[in-house]
Amino acid sequence: MDGDASTRWSTMEAKDDQYIIIDLKEPKTFSSIYLIWEAAFGKKYTIEVSDDGESYTPVATQENGTGGTDVYNIEPTTARYIKINMTERGTGWGYSIYEFSIYE
């Protein structure tokens, strides 16, 4: 999110059901999503989008993640908010993301 691979976002707790919401500040159109995990990765999660920050629609689903870099090429989508809804951890730790990016 910040373009610096030496920083990361992480959950405070080591439990499965966690999420992060990214506010793009204005609607953006994108068709590719890149997610770079630190060692504490999501095994099961969905990436969801919203215009209002309340009602979300899934655009990508991961059922058996292995960490590293996940790339999703989706139908062109316009949204202001992006939610990563993580439902199952791939390790005993929480979740930790180095970078999250969207592209047209």
Image: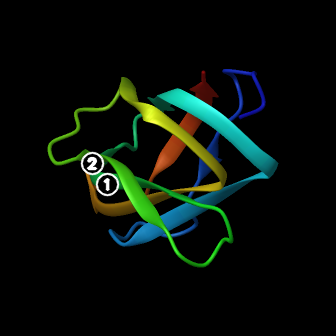
Instruction: Give the crowd class for mark 2: few <14, some 14-19, many >=20 residues within 10 Å.
Output: some
Residue at the image point whose x is 60% and y is 29% from the top: 102
* Residue under numbered circle 1: 45
Q: How many marks?
A: 2
As drawn, 73 above or below 100:
above
- x and y, in percent, of residue 64 in the image: 15, 42
Residue at the image point whose x is 66% and y is 21% from the top: 5
**Circles 2, 1 touching at the beta carbon (< 8 Å):** yes
Residue at the image point whose x is 69% and y is 23% from the top: 6
* Residue under numbered circle 2: 61
Left or right of 9 on screen, residue 87 = left
Nearer to me, 59 or 96: 59
Three-letter residue code for mark 1: Tyr
Please tell me whether mark 2 or mark 1 is closer to you in this view: 2
Residue 69 in which image quadrant: top left
- x and y, in percent, of residue 10 in the image: 58, 52
Instruction: Give the crowd class for mark 1: few <14, some 14-19, many >=20 residues within 10 Å.
Output: many
Nearer to me, 56 or 93: 56
Left or right of 99 on screen, residue 61 = left
As drawn, 7 above or below 19:
above
- x and y, in percent, of residue 68 in the image: 37, 24
Q: How is the image coloured?
A: rainbow
Left or right of 1 on screen, residue 98 = left
- What is the secondary structure assignment of the residue under circle 1? strand
Q: Quadrant of the N terminus?
A: top right
Q: Is residue 99 something that shows in the picture?
A: no
Residue at the image point whose x is 48% and y is 32% from the top: 35
Looking at this rendering, what residue extends furthest in the bottom direction? 54
As drawn, 103 above or below 53:
above
What separation in Å lies between label 2 and label 1 (alpha carbons)?
6 Å
Three-letter residue code for mark 2: Thr
